Image (tube, rainbow, N blue to C red):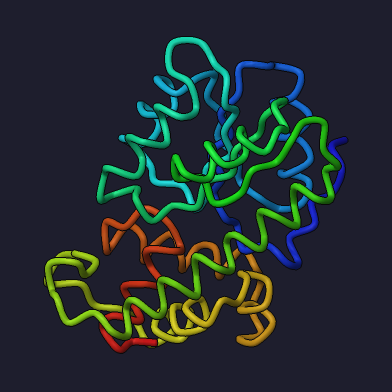
């Protein structure tokens, strides 16, 4: 039997892990999933871009040196695309010199971690980056007056009273488990509500759902 996942602090955030080392991918993916994250993997930048055409993750964790397309080239494209420019990026690299860190951060990475690293530190950096992204998203939603930058959803979207309560709590940064406890229902029920709302709004993840709720004064 696989180990039980700890979803208490994570809210089913979706991470994209990009690395050409299958052993590292296996270890990091297993550890992150055990911590409650949903993880999609890609072997190089080119494959990662294909993944990004289908789903926008809450964060990208990316090796620097890879075949076909390296991490620098991938992040440049991520930052140039309005759909993904806001996504936090963590570089993983065996190169730990100051100039390597500076180049990585200047390219557009938010965090630069040197291999080998402790799994606990990786998770702490992921959590910190996701929280920062959430704060920035909320700030931008509050000050943005330009409708062209707002999350676009079908005009006929209607939420049930329960869905409204759920999305309000999601926008406050609560995990599915915390929302379930507040509303005295099962976590599976909350996951079902979130999934239904994503289908109704044509949004990709909980982050976009929360941003939409904030921008439209639902939250």
Residue at 60% x, 28% y is 63
Q: Is residue 155 left or right of residue 185?
A: left
Q: Is residue 25 left or right of residue 108?
A: right
**Nearest the camera: 107 or 176?**
107
- Above or below, 65 against 6 in this view is above
**Nearest the camera: 68 or 167?**
68
The location of residue 46, given as percent across then percent down, is 39, 20
Q: Is residue 74 left or right of residue 145?
A: right
Q: Which quadrant holds the C terminus? A: bottom left
The location of residue 122, given as percent across then percent down, is 75, 47
Q: Which quadrant holds the N terminus? A: top right
The location of residue 75, given as percent across then percent down, is 42, 36
Quarter residue 188 falls in: bottom right
Quarter residue 155 falls in: bottom left
Quarter residue 128 falls in: bottom right
- Specify the farthest residue to the front: 99
Residue at 37% x, 63% y is 208
The location of residue 56, given as percent across then percent down, is 39, 46
Task: Give the number of callouts.
Answer: 0
- Above or below, 133 against 55 in this view is below
Residue at 31% x, 57% y is 203
Q: Is residue 151 left or right of residue 68?
A: left
**Nearest the camera: 148 or 72?**
72
Residue at 31% x, 35% y is 53
């Amino acid at each position: 039997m696989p180990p039980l996942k700890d979803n208490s602090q994570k809210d089913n955030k979706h991470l994209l892990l990009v690395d050409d080392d299958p052993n590292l991918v296996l270890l990091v993916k297993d550890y992150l999933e055990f911590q409650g994250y949903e993880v999609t993997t890609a072997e190089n930048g080119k494959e990662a871009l294909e993944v990004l055409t289908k789903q926008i993750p809450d964060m990208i964790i990316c090796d620097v040196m890879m075949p076909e397309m390296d991490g620098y080239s991938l992040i440049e494209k991520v930052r140039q695309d309005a759909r993904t420019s806001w996504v936090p990026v963590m570089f993983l690299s065996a190169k730990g010199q100051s100039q390597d860190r500076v180049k990585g951060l200047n390219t557009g990475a938010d965090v630069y971690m040197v291999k080998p690293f402790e799994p606990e530190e990786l998770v702490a950096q992921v959590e910190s980056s996701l929280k920062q992204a959430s704060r920035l998203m909320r700030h931008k939603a509050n000050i943005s007056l330009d409708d062209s930058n707002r999350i676009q959803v079908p005009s006929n979207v209607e939420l049930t009273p329960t869905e409204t309560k759920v999305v309000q709590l999601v926008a406050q940064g609560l995990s599915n488990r915390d929302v379930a406890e507040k509303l005295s229902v099962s976590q599976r029920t909350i996951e079902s509500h979130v999934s239904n709302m994503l289908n109704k709004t044509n949004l990709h993840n909980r982050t976009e759902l929360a941003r939409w709720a904030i921008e439209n004064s639902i939250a």
